Amino acid sequence: MPLDLDEGDGPPSFLDMITTAGYRAATAALRLGVFPALAEGSLPADELAARIDADPRGTALLADVLVACGYLTVDGERYANSPMAGKWLAGGDYARVERFWSTVLFDSWGELETSVRSGTACLDFYAWLAGRPETLERFQRMLSGHAEHIAPEVAGLVPVGETLLDLGGGHAAYPIRLCSANPALHATVVDRPEALNTAAVEEAGLAGRITLRPGDYDELDLGADFDTALLFNVVHGRTAAANRTLLRRVAAALRTGGAVVLLEHDEHPADPVDEAFTRVFSLNLFHGQGGQVYPTREIVDWLLAAGFGEPEVHPLESSPGQSVLIARMGGTR
Ligand SMILES: C[S@@+](CC[C@H](N)C(=O)[O-])C[C@H]1O[C@@H](n2cnc3c(N)ncnc32)[C@H](O)[C@@H]1O
């Protein structure tokens, strides 16, 4: 948080109003390209405005908010990225993550209280995303970037046989890694058509062993006798009732002794910033998808009710606050 205000400065909601406005100004700066424009060095407001193709007075006023909130510094008339903005927001993966989250917060939370009042998601997140190709691309790149980061650890945990079903696995990062390491493995990825990354599978030379199936995993015939099914970051985006039904369908698609593997966020991570993010994430899931970050005990109850054995739970070292759950069909391990 760049702005350092102490509690004596006013009511907490006033401070939150200022930091929210500062974050909205930073979002405008991200969308306008302010931080990359200052990556080479400081600029006066009129030259900055010319670089980002914007109005000079508006740019100066925006830059002053960004200075007040710690995103920029000013020396005389020249504005520069703060070290934090230069490091994280002038380009690269984190700038993409911030653009995704700021769009979610400012463009999709407008009716948040309607969801809370009614108890039903008033936004259809994936339909909302499908109508925003740039945001969809940022979302999928964010997911695949995180998947690449944790895949070495996760792939070491996944029980591998000859067949793998990855539900909601659109970017295909996990099947690509698992099939590359296991020459006998064939994988099927089910996802919405706009999420399936055909190019990544072809680039990996795995089009013959990874089948991409566009469609709804609640509707499609999922097949039978799979050795392994992945449900990574899926159950938190659904209601409890929908998860119970899907887990029964997954159970029917596995052979006896086959494994379902879930990747989920821990309900209460140890780090206080992770805890605060998880609460925001959970509310966002409720508003957009009717889901939430579920307690592990509740997920275990769904698994047992679907015919799986008690799962092994593996907290991830490469992603503190996330765990992999592995449960076998028929209760054998
Ligand atoms: C949070 S992402 C997780 C992606 C990936 N499994 C991972 O962990 O990186 C959820 C994925 O489920 C897909 N999805 C959501 N609802 C779906 C549905 N009804 N049928 C098929 N795919 C769906 C989304 O398009 C998205 O790719």
Image (tube, rainbow, N blue to C red):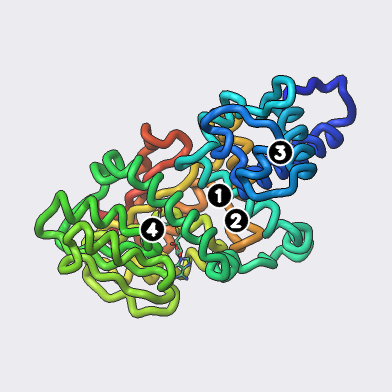
Foreground disc of the pair 1, 2 = 2
The residue under label 1 is: 293
Q: Is residue 189 above or below residue 37?
A: below
Image x and y of residue 250, in percent: 35, 67
Secondary structure of the residue carrying tag 3 is: helix
Q: Is mark 4 within 8 Å of ligand 1?
A: yes
Is residue 1 in view? no
Amino acid type of the residue that numbered disc 3 sits on in the rendered structure: Asp
Amino acid type of the residue that numbered disc 1 sits on in the rendered structure: Val
Amino acid type of the residue that numbered disc 4 sits on in the rendered structure: Leu
| Total numbered circles | 4
The residue under label 4 is: 231
Closer to us: 85 or 151: 85
Which residue is depicted at the point 65% across and 43% down?
Answer: 29
Is residue 54 in view? yes
Image x and y of residue 138, in percent: 49, 54
